[in-house]
Amino acid sequence: MTGTLAIRQDLTLSPDPRRVIVKLFVPGEDAAVARTRAQALIDRVAQLDDEETGRLLRDTFHRFGARHRDLDATFHHHYDLVRHRIARARDLSPTTRLLVGAYFSHEYAVEAAALCNPSMVAHPDQTDLGAGQLRVAVSLRQIGEGHLSSIGFATAVLGPGRRLTVADRSGRLAVGQRVGVRHRRDLLAAGLAEEACDNEITATVLDALPDRYDEATFERVLGNLPPDLLSRRAGLGTLEQLRRTNAASYATTFPADTALHERVLWPATPAESNGLEDARFVRFVDESGPVYRATYTAYDGRRITARVLASRDLRRFEITPMRGPGARNKGIALFPRTVAGRHLALCRADGETIGLTCLDGENRWKPPVPLHAPRDSWELIQVGNCGSPIETDAGWLVLTHGVGPMRRYAIGALLLDLHRPERVVAQLPGALLSPDKADRDGYVPNVVYSCGGLVHAGELWLPYGASDARVGFATVPVAALIAAMMESPAPDGRDG
């Protein structure tokens, strides 16, 4: 029965190698033995005569200008990043400076390797729709050369009925630009506590900072620290830790004339240097109105850490770390509203069990309450969520993923009590969606995986990554799904 509930759509999204951004390129920097060749390259460019310099620059703009937004400004920026290597930078002509910037740039195809792990939320713009239609924003994990992940988007319209239309994704991409952010003192305190950085310097700084502060205020407080504190053995290390912890929170924004599918959330801190993975978006609503939130995994090549972003319009995003025992490991998914005044999230802190965690008064996620451990044959390796819980009259619908033999990923479902989410009401017997012949081959074979769906017009709309290679879509009648789950109530001991 469960294998027939999910109805696959014919439409799929495949990686598009034409979706490119411009990245800084420093020759020699990526070699096994790092030895930058930047100085020698700059010298060679500077030795070109004016005619050759102009011709090369015109040719570069002719080849690449139509593929990127404001390529001139990008070349200027990349020149500024390397000009410290130029002995007499003021002697270079504006044309030569731009050409230097071009030589220190390269195109990067953000999804050349894979496109996967989508989530779906209602779009901020619901204008010009017909009866039974809903416009949605689809977040996408984009993977390019070097297994470097970023967050991209697509726009689609659901309905009427089971009809699905995905808008064209062509256009020049834009990487978000860092902008000023109002930091929160409680988040700084939580980060310092997690790093066990507690001494007279941190106490003095936290006492001097207001509840919300900007970068100038933060640096002014550090600059006003008493010399007898700074001269202590731990002084320099504490200042470095303060700045590192504070910099983990930032904001990024996109030009107003960019379409959603043209926006790329790109790594912006050392903790994210190897990618932003598996964003789980949810439209959170409270007394202040709706806000988009998403959890994702930041990866620096060695460690993973949890991050959360917030946005009112999917154009400006504020990013902060998640702290506490419940925020360890991957796969955190926020509830779309508070429950009995509590901010809740699903998590997998031990790496194999779905748990429920709550945000405490110090902005730390508490140790989780176990909800569902590996139990059935198709999920014996580990279980986790496939996105934020979806509110239904019957309870919180939680899409799960389980890993079975040959590391085969499938999607299942749980139902949590609406008022006491610690209590598992029912479980779908067997998997809801498993890799079929069309899904099993790809970048990571034998995987179907989602980061979140939604309910519209009585249907669960489920976007999913197929073997980390492309994105598919399925629909499930909610009433039939709930009925199938109620036939299999939660086993004993599942009431939290």
Image (tube, rainbow, N blue to C red):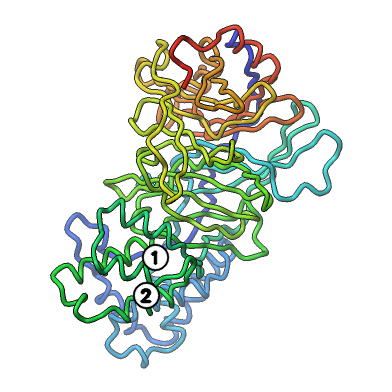
Can residue 493 be seen at all in this image of the molecule? yes
Task: In this rendered view, identify the residue nearer to me: 80 or 481.
Answer: 481
The image quadrant that residue 486 belongs to is: top right
* Residue depicted at 52% across the width and 17% down the height: 436
Count of all numbered marks drawn on residues in the image: 2
**Labels 1 and 2 touching (C-beta < 8 A):** yes
* Residue depicted at 53% across the width and 54% down the height: 264
Q: Mark 1 highlights which residue?
A: 24
Can residue 56 be seen at all in this image of the molecule? no
- What amino acid does circle 1 point to? Leu
Residue 55: image location, x then y, percent: 48, 78
Residue 41: image location, x then y, percent: 29, 74
The earlier-in-sequence mark between 1 and 2 is 1
Q: Is residue 176 left or right of residue 147?
A: right
Q: Mark 2 highlights which residue?
A: 81
Residue 485 marker: none
Q: Is residue 216 left or right of residue 458?
A: left
